[in-house]
C-alpha cells in the first residue's frame, strides 16, 4: 500500500465538491455521525436534499456563504492505496490556492462540465498543472447525464482537450466520462457509458503508477539539523539529519557539500537509530561523514559526480501570493528546503496570462494571483536544480521579512 | 527499482520526522504537547526516531485539567521517565485559583475551555515559540484546513482566513515576538494509520485503550465513566460494562465504546468496521455546535 496525493481542479459549478463527497461516500469513508451532521445542515438550509458538497466546507463562514475559503485536505483509503485529496476552492484567490494544493500532488483531476466543454477555466487549471509539473492528469468529463451520456459530446471534448494538452506538454492524460451526482463511473464502472472502454475513476486512482515519479538519479540531501549528543559515550558523534529528497546514498559514496564545495565520504547511514547500507528518497535519515568538516542547516549534501547548479542569480517563474504587489527591486527571504537567504527581485520580465499563455512584457508590478517571470539575485549562492527536472530541489518560497508571510512560490528555471 | 519503495506508513513516518527536524532547525524554544494519549505517544516515538541518540531539542509539556484518566497520567510519567526526557506539567486548577476563573457548571462541567488559559500562560512562562501537537486533519472539518505550521497571534488565536500558503515540503516558521507556531507533524495521518503504526512499531499504550470493565453512565447514547467530576442524578442509568477508549481526553468529555478488543489487532478490526467517526463516537465537547472546534481554535485552543 502506498500514497497518492491528488488535487481536484474545478469550481462548485463543475461538481467538484460533489465528486469529492461521492468518492468519500462511496468508498465508505464518511461515518454516520458526519452524514447526520450534513443532513442536519442541509435541513438548516431548508432545501431538503443531502448536499455532499457540505462535507468539504469546513469553516462557518464557508457554510454560511456557500463558499470555500482555503485548501482543505481529505483522506480516504482502499486496500490498495491511501489517498490524500487537496481540495482547492474555485472562487477568489484560485491561482494561489491551486498552486499550493498542486505543489505536493502526484495527480490532478481536471473537471470539465460536459455541457460547456473546454472553457477558459479548464485552460487555466491545465496551465497551472503544467507549471507545477504534476506528473499525472485525469480529465473527468462530468455531468454526462445532462448531455444524455452522449459519446459524441465526450469525444469532441477529448479532441479539444488533447490540443490543450499538447500545447502545454502535459503527459500521461486519462479521460473519463462521469456523473458525480449519480455516482456513475466513480467507484464502479457504470452501464451508462457502454461505449467507454476505460475503468472507473477510483480504479484509475488506485492504479496510476507513482513510484516511477521519484527521481533516483540526482541525489540531494538538504541538511536540516545536526545531531551532536556531546555525552561521554557519544563524544565524537556528529550526525547530519535530513530527508533524502531525491536519489540514493550508499555507505562509501564520495560526496560534496554545497554551496561550500567541501568533499568527504559517507561513513555511515542511520534510519531510526539503526545502521543501514543505503538510503533513498523520500527517507528521513542521518548521514555520517568520514571528515569533520563544517556543515550546517541549509547545506545540501550531493554525490560528487552529480552536482546541482550553485548560483546567486536565478531565473524564476513566480506565482505571487502576497496581498501587497510585487515591485521590481523589492527584497525578500528566499527559502529552498532548509536554506534561507536574502534575495532581491531584480526584474519582472513578463506576466503570464494563465488563460491564454500569452506573455505581457515588462509589467510594472505583479498582483496577487499573477504568474510572472522574474530574475532573482540572492545574497549567497543557492544550490538548486531546475523545477522541471527536479521538483523537490527546484521549488522555493519568498517570505516578506517585515510581515513574515509567504508571498511567493518560485519555480526555478 | 521495486526495492526502493516506501509503503504508506514509512512515507508518513518520514514526512513527520522531517517536520520534527524543521521545528528543531527553525525554533529556539519549542515544546512538545504530551497528554499520554495515543496520538501524542506516537509523536514521542517519531521524535525518538528524529533525534536519537541526541536528546530532544524540546521538553514534553502537559496541561493537566485535573480531569484526566489516572491511567493516562501514570503512562505519561512512565514514558517521560523511560526515555529520560524532561516533562513539564502545569495545572488548570492553579490557573483557576490565580486568575479567579469561573468553572463551567452542569452535569459534565468541562475544563476544556479553561485549559487554553493555562496553555497560554505556560507558553509565556517558558517563552515557547513553537508547540508541537498531535492533531490530525481527518479528525474534524476545521482541522482539515489548518496548516502543518500554524501561526497563532499573541493571544493564541488562529485566523483561518490569514493562513500562510504552505508549499512543497517548505515550512515557513518565521514569527514576530509574542507569536508562536503550532506544529502538527501527523496532520496527514488518519486514525487507522495511527493504529497500524502502533502495531508495526509495537508501541506501548495506556491500559484504557484496551477492553476493560468500568462503571459507566449511559447518556444520550454515549457511555461516560462515572467519576468524582460528574454529577449523577437519580434517574441516571449506571452499570458496569466492558469498554475501551478510542480517544483519551478529559473524563468529563470523553466517552467510552463497548468493546471486547483486548489487543491491537482486535482494535484495528473494530475501527475498520465502525460506522462512527472517532470524535463523533467519543467526544461530548464537539456536540455543542457545528463549529465548536473552529471556535475553540480561534480562541487559542490547541
Image (cartoon, rainbow, N blue to C red):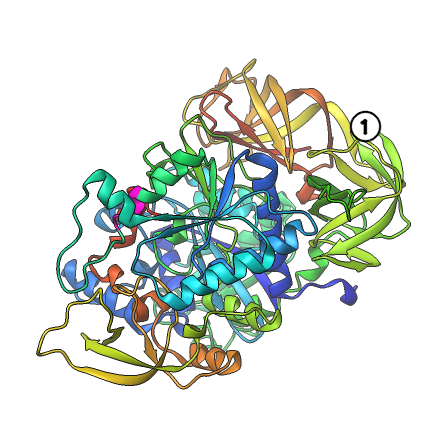
Dot 1: within a 10 Å radius of its alpha carbon, few (fewer than 14), some, or many (20 or more) residues? some
Q: What quarter of the picture does the N terminus of chain A occupy?
A: bottom right
Query: Which chain hosts label 1?
Result: A
Q: Magenta span has B273?
A: no
Residue A199 locus on image (x, y percent): 55, 73
Residue A203 locus on image (x, y percent): 55, 72
Front residue of this view, candidates A399 and A92: A399
- Which residue is pictured at 49% across the width and 70% down the height? B192
Q: Is residue A339 left or right of residue B105?
A: right
Front residue of this view, candidates B32 and B176: B32
Q: Which residue is mark 1?
A: A260
Mark 1: which secondary structure?
loop
Q: Which residues are magenta?
A: B113-117
Residue B249: image quadrant is bottom left
- Which residue is pictured at 31% across the width and 69% down the height? B282
Front residue of this view, candidates B247 and A373: B247
Residue A46 locus on image (x, y percent): 13, 61
Report the residue that reaches farthest toward the top. A329
Q: What quarter of the picture does the C terminus of chain A occupy?
A: top right
Q: Is residue B149 left or right of residue A376?
A: left
- Which residue is pictured at 51% across the width and 22% down the height? A401
For the image, the number of numbered tags is 1
Residue A37 locus on image (x, y percent): 24, 65
- Which residue is pictured at 50% across the width and 69% down the height? B205
Residue A114: image quadrant is bottom left
Amino acid at each position: 500500500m502506498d500514497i497518492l496525493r491528488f488535487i481536484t481542479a474545478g469550481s462548485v459549478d463543475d461538481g467538484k465538491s460533489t465528486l469529492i463527497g461521492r468518492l468519500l461516500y462511496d468508498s465508505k469513508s464518511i461515518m454516520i455521525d458526519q452524514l447526520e451532521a450534513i443532513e442536519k445542515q442541509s435541513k438548516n438550509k431548508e432545501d431538503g436534499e443531502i448536499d455532499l458538497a457540505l462535507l468539504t466546507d469546513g469553516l462557518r463562514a464557508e457554510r454560511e456563504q456557500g463558499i470555500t475559503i482555503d485548501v482543505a485536505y481529505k483522506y480516504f483509503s482502499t486496500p490498495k492505496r491511501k489517498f490524500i485529496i487537496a481540495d482547492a476552492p474555485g472562487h477568489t484567490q484560485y491561482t494561489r490556492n491551486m498552486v499550493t494544493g498542486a505543489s505536493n500532488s502526484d495527480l490532478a483531476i481536471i473537471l470539465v462540465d460536459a455541457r460547456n466543454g473546454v472553457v477558459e477555466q479548464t485552460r487555466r487549471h491545465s496551465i497551472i498543472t503544467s507549471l507545477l509539473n504534476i506528473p499525472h492528469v485525469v480529465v473527468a468529463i462530468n455531468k454526462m447525464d445532462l448531455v444524455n451520456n452522449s459519446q459524441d459530446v465526450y469525444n469532441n471534448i477529448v479532441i479539444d482537450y488533447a490540443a490543450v494538452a499538447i500545447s502545454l506538454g502535459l503527459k500521461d492524460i486519462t479521460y473519463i466520462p462521469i456523473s458525480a451526482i449519480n455516482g456513475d463511473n466513480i467507484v464502479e464502472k457504470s452501464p451508462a457509458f457502454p461505449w467507454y472502454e476505460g475503468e472507473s475513476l477510483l480504479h484509475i486512482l488506485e492504479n496510476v503508477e507513482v513510484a516511477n515519479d521519484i527521481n533516483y538519479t540526482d541525489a540531494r540531501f538538504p541538511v536540516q539539523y545536526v545531531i551532536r549528543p556531546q555525552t561521554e559515550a557519544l563524544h565524537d558523534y556528529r550526525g547530519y539529519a535530513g530527508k533524502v529528497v531525491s536519489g540514493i546514498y550508499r555507505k562509501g559514496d564520495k560526496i560534496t557539500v554545497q554551496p561550500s564545495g567541501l568533499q568527504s565520504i559517507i561513513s555511515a547511514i542511520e534510519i531510526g537509530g539503526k545502521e543501514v547500507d543505503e538510503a533513498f528518497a523520500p527517507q528521513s535519515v542521518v548521514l555520517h561523514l568520514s571528515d569533520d568538516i563544517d556543515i550546517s542547516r541549509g547545506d545540501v549534501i550531493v554525490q560528487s559526480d552529480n552536482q546541482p547548479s550553485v548560483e546567486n542569480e536565478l531565473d524564476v517563474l513566480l506565482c505571487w501570493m502576497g496581498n501587497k504587489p510585487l515591485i521590481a527591486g523589492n527584497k525578500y527571504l528566499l527559502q529552498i528546503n532548509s536554506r534561507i537567504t536574502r534575495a532581491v527581485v531584480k526584474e519582472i520580465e513578463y506576466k503570464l496570462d494563465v488563460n491564454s499563455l500569452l506573455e505581457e512584457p515588462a509589467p510594472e508590478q505583479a498582483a496577487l494571483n499573477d504568474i510572472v517571470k522574474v530574475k532573482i539575485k540572492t545574497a549567497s549562492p543557492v544550490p538548486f536544480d531546475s523545477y522541471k527536472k527536479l521538483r523537490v530541489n527546484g521549488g522555493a518560497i519568498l517570505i516578506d521579512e517585515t510581515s513574515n508571510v509567504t508571498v511567493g512560490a518560485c519555480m526555478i528555471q | 527499482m521495486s526495492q526502493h519503495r516506501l509503503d504508506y506508513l514509512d512515507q508518513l513516518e518520514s514526512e513527520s520526522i522531517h517536520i520534527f527536524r524543521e521545528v528543531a532547525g527553525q525554533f529556539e524554544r519549542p515544546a512538545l504537547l504530551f497528554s499520554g494519549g495515543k496520538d501524542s505517544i506516537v509523536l514521542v516515538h517519531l521524535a525518538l526516531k528524529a533525534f536519537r541518540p541526541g536528546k530532544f531539542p524540546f521538553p514534553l509539556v502537559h496541561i493537566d485539567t485535573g480531569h484526566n484518566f489516572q491511567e493516562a497520567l501514570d503512562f505519561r510519567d512512565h514514558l517521560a521517565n523511560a526515555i529520560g526526557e524532561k516533562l513539564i506539567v502545569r495545572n488548570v486548577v492553579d490557573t483557576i485559583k490565580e486568575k479567579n476563573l469561573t468553572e463551567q457548571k452542569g452535569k459534565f462541567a468541562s475544563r476544556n475551555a479553561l485549559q487554553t488559559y493555562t496553555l497560554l500562560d505556560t507558553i509565556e512562562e517558558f517563552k515557547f515559540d513553537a508547540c508541537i501537537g498531535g492533531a490530525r486533519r481527518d479528525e474534524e472539518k476545521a482541522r482539515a484546513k489548518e496548516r502543518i505550521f500554524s501561526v497563532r497571534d499573541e493571544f493564541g488565536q488562529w485566523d483561518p482566513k490569514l493562513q500562510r500558503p504552505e508549499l512543497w515540503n517548505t515550512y515557513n516558521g518565521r514569527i514576530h515576538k509574542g507569536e508562536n507556531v503550532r506544529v502538527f507533524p501527523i496532520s496527514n495521518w488518519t486514525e487507522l494509520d495511527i493504529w497500524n503504526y502502533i502495531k508495526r512499531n509495537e508501541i506501548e499504550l495506556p491500559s484504557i485503550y484496551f477492553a476493560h470493565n468500568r462503571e459507566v453512565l449511559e447518556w444520550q447514547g454515549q457511555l461516560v465513566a462515572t467519576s468524582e467530576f460528574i454529577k449523577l442524578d437519580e434517574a441516571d442509568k449506571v452499570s458496569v460494562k466492558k469498554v475501551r477508549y478510542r480517544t483519551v481526553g478529559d473524563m468529563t468529555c470523553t466517552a467510552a465504546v463497548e468493546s471486547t478488543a483486548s489487543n491491537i489487532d482486535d482494535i484495528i478490526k473494530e475501527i475498520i468496521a465502525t460506522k462512527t467517526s472517532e470524535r463523533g463516537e467519543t467526544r461530548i465537547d464537539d456536540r455543542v455546535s457545528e463549529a465548536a472546534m473552529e471556535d475553540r481554535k480561534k480562541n487559542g485552543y490547541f
